[in-house]
Amino acid sequence: MNTAIVTMKGQIVIPSKIRRKHHIKKGTKLNIVDREDQIILQPLTSEYFEKMAGILKTKGKLTKAILKERSNEREIEDEKWSK
């Protein structure tokens, strides 16, 4: 069983083994799914978007646009941290 403690700010640390397995790195966004008695954290990685591309029937155009937007967001965040 993997556990985490919630801080006063509501933050948790995801164990490194799980982060590596799911390719979660600094800046990775997570989809938070609230089910009746569960909270599911789903990493929004390029692998996730590649899997979802076929569902939307946009021939990958939407996936490319989303990945480009995420890349731009990361660049902006990196610029903030470097100042």
Image (cartoon, rainbow, N blue to C red):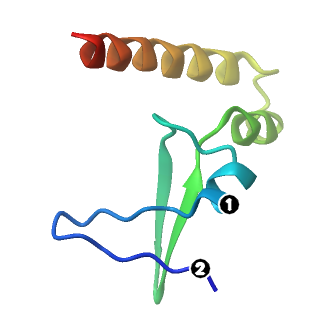
Residue bearing the label numbered 1 = 17
Tags 1 and 2 touching, CB below 8 Å: yes
**Residue drawn 60% across the image and 57% down it:** 16
Q: Which amino acid does label 2 sit on?
A: Asn
* Label 1 crowd bin: few (<14), some (14–19), many (20+), radius 10 Å: few
Where does the image place residue 39, in percent across and percent down from the top left?
A: 47, 75
Residue bearing the label numbered 2 = 2
Element on which disc 2 rests: loop
Which of 51 and 75 lies nearest the eye of the viewer?
Answer: 75
Q: Quadrant of the rendered structure where residue 11 is?
A: bottom left
**Residue drawn 57% across the image and 23% down it:** 66
Which of 32 and 7 lies nearest the eye of the viewer?
Answer: 7
Total of numbered circles in the picture? Answer: 2
Q: Which quadrant is home to the C terminus?
A: top left
Q: Is residue 62 above or below residue 30?
A: above
Where does the image place residue 44, in percent across and percent down from the top left?
A: 59, 42
Which of 31 and 8 lies nearest the eye of the viewer?
Answer: 8
Q: Which quadrant is home to the N terminus?
A: bottom right
